[in-house]
Amino acid sequence: MNPGRRLNMTLMQLRRLGRERSQELLTLAVLWLLLPLVSLVLMLALADVLFKMTAVWRWLALGGIVASLIAVVAWLVRFSRHRLSLQALAVLVEKAQPTADNHIINAVQFYEQGNVQADFIERLLEEPGVRLEQIEARQLYPARSRQWLKRAYPVALLLWLIPFLCAPAGMATSLARIFLPFAGIRPHSRTVIVEVTPGDLSVKRGQEVEIVAQLAGDIPSKATLQLEDETEPPVTLEMASGENASFSAKTSALYATTRYRVLAGDASSEWHRLRIAPVPGLVRWEAAVAPPPHTGRKNYLVKHDQEVMEVMPGSTMIFAGLATMRLASIAILQGDKEIAVKELNSKEFSVKANLVSDAPVSIKLLSAEEVEAVQPVPLT
């Protein structure tokens, strides 16, 4: 059925109202769904300001924000694809304009049925006295959503303004820490811990370590060093004040892996680790021995698992084997005298030495972590 002029205009206006209603509802939905997201970000930022969240918690917070945002976008895409039929739009128009007296909905129904003459539909549309071009899309949905939105956003803005006015730098830093958890941004503080040395370090068993903290900003009158290990209760040491806003303290002898941090003013450094480095040792070794020429003896090989390991003074020896860890160097000692040394960067080694006396032979190993060990070998 070819629609008449009035019916054609009515259908055009209904489609316009449908499009505009969908656009306005989608805008309202976006604004309403932004409120919980904005509130979530505000609560996370306040939590970081108050409790200085660790990197794990900040990664979880960012993941929650991203997941919420994806859920919101998915729901909005689905919502945007929903369209009302012409009949449903006609019903909404009739509710907004009761004077239409069901004429518009009847005209649309007759048109869609296709078995009613166009002249009858045209006469039906003459009676309502409703001008659809004067109806706005906002009349086709409840006004409460707009009214509540006008109240909610000023409240949300006020809730954001209060912490930003009280602690602008702290809030800005916390937002950056939440959205960039991989950047290693420290919590905001008036006192700034610029550097803590030596940071993470491998140390020898029983070694003492001096910790130095360089400060900036509001310099406090004192700073403390916190130490924790697996075997002893936590220890707090007062740090001595030095030049150029620095503080220092020395640990006691360390016998277990220890973590430490510096507390100064309202700032705290990251935790650093002092790891007890393992002592290097020998897995296996062998010595290729060339006796002095005047003895007339042939060259021979001595291995670590032999019972008799005789080596004459004046012999030339190539000492080779495998260490328990990567070595920086190896040295052969006779008594207290170093008779050969070789720099390395591996577990395997080979070093040549001339045995100058009958003093006992030992091997000095220096690991890549600069831990030294002296191991005697039973060469007599």
Image: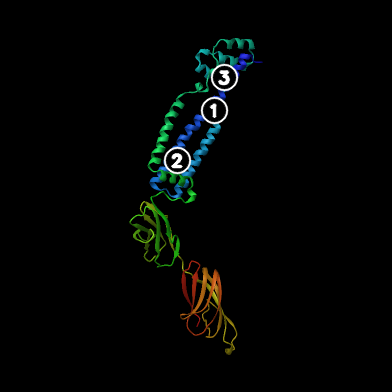
Q: Which of 239 and 19 lies nearest the eye of the viewer?
A: 239
Residue at image coords 56%, 23%: 18
Helix, strand or loop for disc 2:
helix
CB-based contact (under 8 Å), mark 1 and mark 3:
no
**Within the image, what quadrant is residue 112 found in?**
top right
Residue that extends furthest to the bottom in the rendered view of this protein: 294
Residue that extends furthest to the front in the rendered view of this protein: 244
The residue pinned by badge 3 equals 87
Number of numbered discs present? 3
Mark pair 2, 1: CA separation: 27 Å
CB-based contact (under 8 Å), mark 2 and mark 1:
no
Q: Nearer the viewer, mark 3 or mark 2?
A: 2
Residue at image coords 57%, 14%: 106
Quadrant that contains the N terminus: top right
Residue at image coords 50%, 40%: 67
Mark pair 3, 2: CA separation: 42 Å
Q: Which of 15 and 246 lies nearest the eye of the viewer?
A: 246
On residue 41, which mark appears? Answer: 2
Residue 285 screen position, x and y as percent: 54, 74
Q: Which of 144 and 220 lies nearest the eye of the viewer?
A: 220
Which amino acid, by three-letter code, is at mark 1? Gln
Which amino acid, by three-letter code, is at mark 2? Val
Q: Nearer the viewer, mark 1 or mark 3?
A: 1
Q: Is residue 73 above or below residue 98?
A: below
Residue 267 in sight here: yes
